Amino acid sequence: MKKNTFVTHLECSISGERYEKDLVHGLSDKGKPLLVRYDLEKIKELFSKDYIKKTDKNGFWRYSFLLPVETSNIISLGEVLTPLLSLDNVAKKLNQKKDLLVKDEGLLPTSSFKARGLGVAVSMAKQFGIRHLAIPSNGNAGAAMAAYGAKAGIKCTVFCPDDTPEINIREISRLGAEIFKVNGLINDCGKIVREGKDEVGWFDVSTLKEPYRIEGKKTMGLELAEQLNWELPDVIFYPTGGGTGLIGMWKAFSELQKLGWVEKKLPRMVAVQADGCAPIVDAWRQGKETAELWENANTIAAGIRVPVAVGDFLIIRAVNESNGFAISVSDNEIVEARDFVSKTEGTLLCPEGAATLAAFEKSLSEGLVSNNDRVVLFNCASGLKYSLPEVKNTLNKDQSVDYSMF
Ligand SMILES: *Cc1c(COP(=O)(O)O)cnc(C)c1O
């Protein structure tokens, strides 16, 4: 096997115990996520900010020196650097004085940022010669795994709650994965994957239950830093389900700091959830380190309808270390924020992305952030992957048109 990565080992996120890099891993012996560690001294010696500008690798693969995938195992579906859009019309209306930016992840393969995590995880599965992957998914993760799995020639099995957006379910099926609709939530789907492991022999790609999706998601932080010319924003609002992205970005910032590529001050990380499923917000408010299972989880923001997260303590840790906070918003606020942005900015956010704007507005009015903060929101999927309100206007071409109505 060609060794051209800078991975030194993996580390249990709770005990710090070391794990060998060249073995297939799930959770640590303590049942907690494993984090990948790199030889940052070596990377610092060999790479620079300038090097990144010149690389010809697609999208997030440009940061391959901070990823675990050997070059020959990279599976690429045409990843792009996602745009950082300025919501200047919205900012004006909210009296926000500094940047209000949204990182629009809907342009990645399969139209969501799950492509980052699954692109890396499936490439690693290829690297390890794994033949069968299984995942519980609210839609986007399953689609991304199916796409990269199809390209890699790896069998994929997906379990979705039966009320997952229909477009996702059909997309996953067209991408060649076997998909099953389960009469439950994502944690019920996760249980099926976990309990079938020994009998079927599939590899469990659940959020944070293998070490590499977080490495892919980390590239959001690297890309953001590069796009902002290595000056990170004051606050990041992140729609938090399993929390891979928030934990991943926090890990990325720490790695960038150790490389000396960003200055001391790191962004405050804000975990945004929906009122109908807010286990992290609840736990954070009560000063707890871990969260309780959220009963009867319910929100239109499917991607953040995650009643229990194995990385709960890592989310809360990142929020606290960054002097951030956790906040939830209602489905009504989400819909209002989505419609506000689409009509004033020409950008159709997904409900999870809209939740971050709703949370920003609420935080501004509650004084949790100031209108002088540079703020980045995350829109994690294309707004087109969700059902939209029906349009009732019709016009009969065979009757005279009443032009007074326009
Ligand atoms: C998965 C998902 C999220 C949550 O991401 P995590 O990093 O797992 O917390 C948010 N929004 C969308 C659209 C998603 O698909």
Image (tube, rainbow, N blue to C red):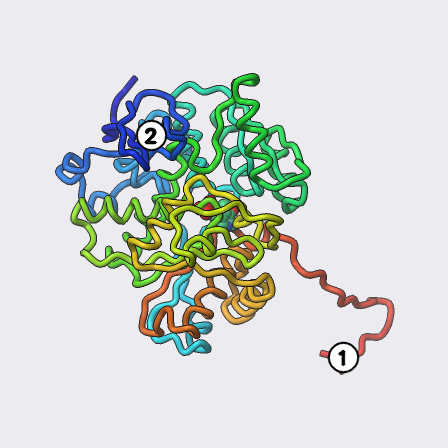
- When the figure is inspected, residue 296 is found, relative to residue 116, above or below; the finding is below
Q: Secondary structure at mark 1?
A: helix
Q: Nearer the viewer, residue 397 or 24?
A: 24
The quadrant where residue 74 appears: top left
Residue 299 left/right relative to 268: right
Mark 1 or mark 2: name the one nearer the start of the chain: 2
Q: Which residue is mark 1?
A: 403
Q: Amino acid at mark 2?
A: Val
Q: Would you say the beta carbon of the disc 2 residue lies within 8 angstroms of ligand 1?
A: no
Residue 212 left/right relative to 200: left
Observer-side mark, 1 or 2, equals: 2
- When the figure is inspected, residue 116 is found, relative to residue 9, above or below; the finding is below
Q: Residue at x 56, y 18 (%)?
A: 200
Q: Judge the density around disc 1: few (<14), some (14-19), many (≥20) Cα neighbours within 10 Å.
A: few
Residue found at the very far bottom of the displayed protein: 404
- Residue 313 rendering spot, x and y as whole percentages: 38, 45
Q: Residue at x 53, y 59 (%)?
A: 349
Mark 1 vs mark 2, CA separation in Å: 61 Å
- Residue 254 rendering spot, x and y as whole percentages: 24, 47
- Residue 264 rendering spot, x and y as whole percentages: 19, 56
- Residue 266 rendering spot, x and y as whole percentages: 26, 56
Please indicate, yes or no, whether residue 103 appears anywhere in the rendered image. Answer: no
Q: Which residue is mark 2?
A: 69
The quadrant where residue 37 appears: top left
The C terminus: image quadrant:
bottom right
The N terminus: image quadrant:
top left
Q: Amino acid at mark 1?
A: Tyr
